[in-house]
Amino acid sequence: MNLKSPLPIRFRLLGIVLLSMPIAACLNNANDCVPSGNCTSVAPTTANLKLKLTINSENASVPIAVYEGDASDSVLYFLDTIAAATISYTVAVDQRYSAVAKYRQGNLTILAVDGDKTKLTSNNDCGDRCYEVSDALLNLKLAQ
Amino acid sequence: MGILKRRNFLWNVKLLLLLCSSNFIVLQAIAQQPLVPEIGLGLNFNGTDAMLNLGAGVSFQNIRTSAKVSFQPRLGAKRVFVETASPNVLIQYRERRYLLGLEVDKRFKLTEFSEYTELGLFVGGFIGMSFNDYRGTDARGSVDLGYEGMAGAYIGDPHVCLLRLGYLYLPLPTQNVFPHRIGFSFSILFADES
C-alpha cells in the first residue's frame, strides 16, 4: 500500500509553518509575557490631522477647506487660512478627512486636493488591550 | 445555390474542427510541460516613481518560461494636475496607480554554479490594464492599456527560488514619471521533488 502523501514536502513544511504560528500565539501564556511600558488602555477619541502646505511669495497665506469624507461629495468641516508650511488640528479618530488648498500661480488658480484617514488600532499586550492612534497626513504642497 | 451554401457550411465546419484540433495540440503540449507554481514579489523604480509587483502563476520548467498574473500598486501617490472646465483653474490631485495583467518571461541559462544554482538572462513583458484613483476625492480616474518590457539577469535554483534584476520599460500616463526603471524580483517556485 502506498502511504506516500500526495502533497510535496515543501507544501507540507509551508502548511506546518503557517499552522504553527496561530498555535504558538494561542499557547503564549501571560506568565512569560513582558508588557510594553506605554500601553494606552482607554480608546482615544481624537487624533491629529496634519497638513503640509507651500508658502511662498505668491502664497504668503493659503486658504484651505477641510471636509469629512471625500472633498467632492462630503460635509465641509471647517475653513481656515494658513500662513505656515505645516499645521495640525485635533479631529475625531477613525474618520476620513480631505482638504483643498487654494494657490495662486501667475494667472492660474491651483486647487490642491488630498485625503487620508485617522485610524484606531488595538493589540493584545499580555492580556491587556492597548490602543494606538494613526494620524492623518494631507500633503497639499504644490508640485515643483 | 443550395449546393454552394452546403459546401460553404461544410468548409466552415472543417475549418472549425481544424482550429479546435490545433488548439487542442497546443493545449496538450502545454499540459505536458512540468508546471510548477510560482509566486513572486518585486519592486521597480526610478527617481520619479516606484511600484510594487505581486505575482502568482506557473513556471513551465522545460521551456524555462514563467507566466504570472501580476498586480502592481504604486508605492505612495504622485502629484498630478488635471484641467478643469475653466482654463485658469487646475486641480492638483495625489494619484494612486495600479497595473493588473499577465506577465510572461523567458529565461536563458548561461552557466551553472552548482547542481542547484544557475545564472542566466531573461526577457519578458507585461500586458494588462493600468488604472488610477485620487486621494481625497471620488473623482473618476481612467483605465488605460498597461504594458511593460523587461530584460536582465537571474540567479537561483529554478525549482526553488529565482532572483531577477534588470531594466524595465514601463510607460505610464502619469505626468513627470519616466518610463525607464530598474526592476528586481524574488520568486519562490514549488517544484514537486517526490
Image (cartoon, helix red, strand yellow):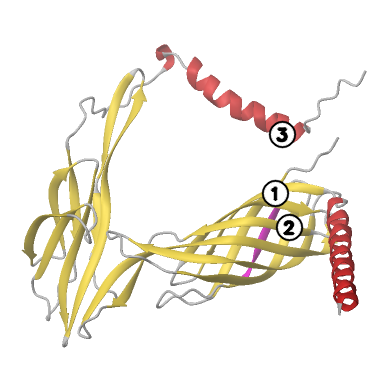
Circle 3 Cα neighbour tier, 10 Å, few/some/many (<14 / 14–19 / ≥20): few
**In the picture, which quadrant includes the C terminus of chain A?**
bottom left
Marks 2 and 3, how far apart in space? 20 Å
Instruction: Tell me whether marks 1 and 2 sit on the same chain.
Output: yes
A134, B70: nearer the viewer? B70
**Quarter of the figure with residue A37:** top left
Classify mark 2: helix, strand or loop.
strand
Marks 3 and 1, how far apart in space? 12 Å
What segment carries the magenta color? B161-167
**In the picture, which quadrant includes the N terminus of chain A?**
top right
Q: Which residue is mark 1?
A: B38
Q: Is residue B186 left or right of residue A88?
A: right
Residue A11's disc number? 3
Classify mark 3: helix, strand or loop.
helix
Residues tagged 1 and 2 counted as in contact (Cβ below 8 A): yes
Which residue type does callout 3 highlight?
Answer: Phe
Q: Is residue A144 visible?
A: no
B166, A7: nearer the viewer? A7
Q: Which residue is mark 2?
A: B66
